[in-house]
Image: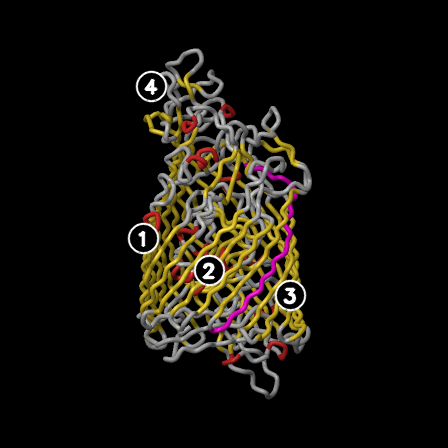
Amino acid sequence: MGRPGHARILLMASVSTGLVSGLGFATNAGAAQDEETNVQNLPAVEVVAPQPTARRAPSRTVPARTAANSDKPKAGRIYVYPTSPGTGRGLDVDKVPSAINAVDANQIKRTGSLNVTDALRDNIAGVSISEVTGNPFQPNVEFRGFVASPVTGTPQGLAVYQNGVRINEAFSDAVNWDLIPTAAIRSATLVTNNPAFGLNALGGAINLQMKDGFTYQGAELDVMGGSFGRIQGSAQWGKQVDKNYGIYAALEGLHDNGFRNFSQSDVRRFYSDVGYKAGDSEFHVNMGVAKNDFGASATVPAELLNNYWGATYTTPQTSSNRVGYLNLTAKADATPTWTLEGTAHLRRYEQKIVDGNPTDVGECTADATLLCFGDGATPANGTNGLQLGNPFASGTILGEIDRSSIRSTTFGVSGQATNADQLLGHDNRFVIGTSYDASVTRYDATAEIGSMGENYLVSGSGLFLGPTGTIDTGFAGPVSLRTVNQYNGVYAMDTFNVTDALAITGGGRFNVARISLEDQLGTALNGDYTYSRFNPVIGGTYKITPGLTAYAGYSEANRVPTPLELGCADPNNPCLIAAFLVSDPPLKQVVSKTVEAGLRGTKELNIGTLGWKIGGFRATNYDDILAVPAPGRTGFGYFTNVGRTRRQGLEAEVNIKSPTLQFQASYTFVDARFLDALTLGSDSPFADADGNIQVLPGNQIPAIPRHRIKVGVDYAVTDEWKVGGNALFVSSQYLVGDESNQYSKLPSYTVFNLHTSYQVTKTVQLYGKIDNIFDNRYATYGQFFDTTALPNFANGGNNFNDPRSLSPARPRAFYAGARVTF
């Protein structure tokens, strides 16, 4: 929204179901400013107060507005929340039968980060981040025990949308957070208990709405630098031309050497939007490109970290991401009560990964001049089908450089209609929509044998593995696969005001997915799979008092197996996950059934506006999919259905906002467990002679901490100088591979951060921050690894004794920057 006026204005818009009032500042019109709203962090919608005369049909901007929600927010402003993937204004928060979780542009800015995930972690109670890749720009985002990860092969449980377009990548449903233009984000909402967001929304959907020339005017330059060679900058500019046209553009760049060996990062992103408005109609064309390169994409044996916190294990470990996309959106009022909107999008995504690993290839027992697989007898063939000769000196430790590439082109269209006519004399909001997405992916992988140095760097030899007759000995030959995904969805949602205080929501979505696999080198991977399901939702809200609302809801959601999972689902023929596919047994789709309920409210105090919420949830997954490692083969594994799992817990938050003080504290409890008995392969020290562990009903799911506590405070010492800080506590968690819960947990950790800013002039701001001020050394993720695959060169070449491989967190870091607005 625009920033009229020249005085500093505090806007306190008390939201009847909200957690705390809005807090907004306006400065001179020439300086670009992002609007800071309430803890829902949703852009306010300007509305016209209803006439006190005869009853009339509600307008498009105020669906389901009744006496119960007409506590008349100051200046005629209400707050709305997305209930579908479209870019429309959503539903009045009073009527949303689920938790309210969101972040606004100012909260993103305050992190001083070009990662939107940092703002999600700091401001949404149930979100935690783990750097599984060892790189801060490619984190796992976990919410309620469900994950959105950039790591190919991670079972995904969160859907992510950007301007109404689903951006989970086609081949593996991975989410590449580094490709999202962070400076251009207007708001990020985490929607729960809602199947309208389609596939993968098991734990919820993260809905990103981007800026445009109508919502952001002015210009801003932001430059920051600091520890580990970090230098970053962003520029954004928006302008409304006349009353009809809006233009917006954002450019971001970053270089970071990283604190680990070989862990440099380079991020380059551009985003732009051109919009046109005419009356109640609005049209936008937006596009974006990104070109990012990263190093250090793996965990590290704990024994190496004990010697040096920046250690790496088996390099090279690099990834390169490229994306280009074009989106068209349109919205218009067909009648005073019907709003139509539609989108069309085209996306091109490319990823290249170079991954150094241990190998099962070595000299043959009978003839040391030839190469064989681990048993010493099975020939290791080259790409010509002939057995490879052994060019390496006797005693050379061999490794493998696995290279893979993904090239995906996705096209999609969607349409949605919203109606605000009364039903049976009561206010009502009805939404119906449909979407179609089609993706074509080409996946290729090769394996090159090389020598392993004492720094765990694999040097290639030019010898590439080809097909071998015995897959289960550790096959890692070339793969070339073409996949086609077709996802269709139809959804409908209706919110009916039974009384002024009570609103009921019901609806559902029907999903149909078809996945085709076409092996380009043979027939082993060929397959054609179709999945379909209807997912219902029902819920309600009740306004107990003007400042207190109760909500409850039940919904179902599903995700279908990805092409990657379908191509690596045979326990008898494990593959190098995220690199090599070997066979394609079918997998069942995952179905999640969720119930949640809670209370939220606000109260005006002398020190500011108090907001709070508390809620509970339970999600049960049926036919859950898990990546299972193959014992004794580093990196090898397969995907399988593991029966039922359950995630349940409690989320509580309290905050205070005033012109000088902003305070937030939250606590989250997540209990995630297996509900069925399983036998899984594992590198756990407690595995049996066959390398298996026995999982019992009630065992906790690894990598999901049970307790999270967050505290943050910002204080205006003067009008120009602000100081603040935040603290994060994450409890212990089981290591991946310890599904039987027999090994000691990954320790809990607490990290403290400080930040400050000084407004030198109306347009110039200096700021700084210290992350991890006590230089705590902790790991955010851990798993087991094969301790016999390679020697511990840091310990004289002896075997590793500690089976843990960890993702180390960044040590203490100092950053300073300047921000200029025009």
> What residue does disc 3 label?
599
Crowding at dot 3, Cα within 10 Å, few <14 / some 14-19 / many 20+, comes out as: many
Q: Which of marks 3 and 1 is nearer the N terminus?
A: 1
Q: Which of marks 2 and 1 is nearer the N terminus?
A: 1
Q: How many marks?
A: 4
Badge nearest the viewer, 4 or 3: 3
Position of residue 391 relative to residue 327, above or below, is above
Query: Can you give x and y, in whole percent of width and height, for residue 363 in the image?
Result: 41, 17
At numbered mark 1, what does the secondary structure look like: helix, strand or loop?
A: strand
653 part of magenta stretch? yes
Give the main secondary structure of the magenta stretch.
Answer: strand
Query: Can you give x and y, in whole percent of width and height, for residue 415 in the image?
Result: 50, 62
**Residue 747 as seen in the image, left or right of residue 277:** right
Label for residue 725?
2
Give the extent of the magenta segment.
Answer: 639-659
Residue type highlighted by circle 2: Gly
598 part of magenta stretch? no
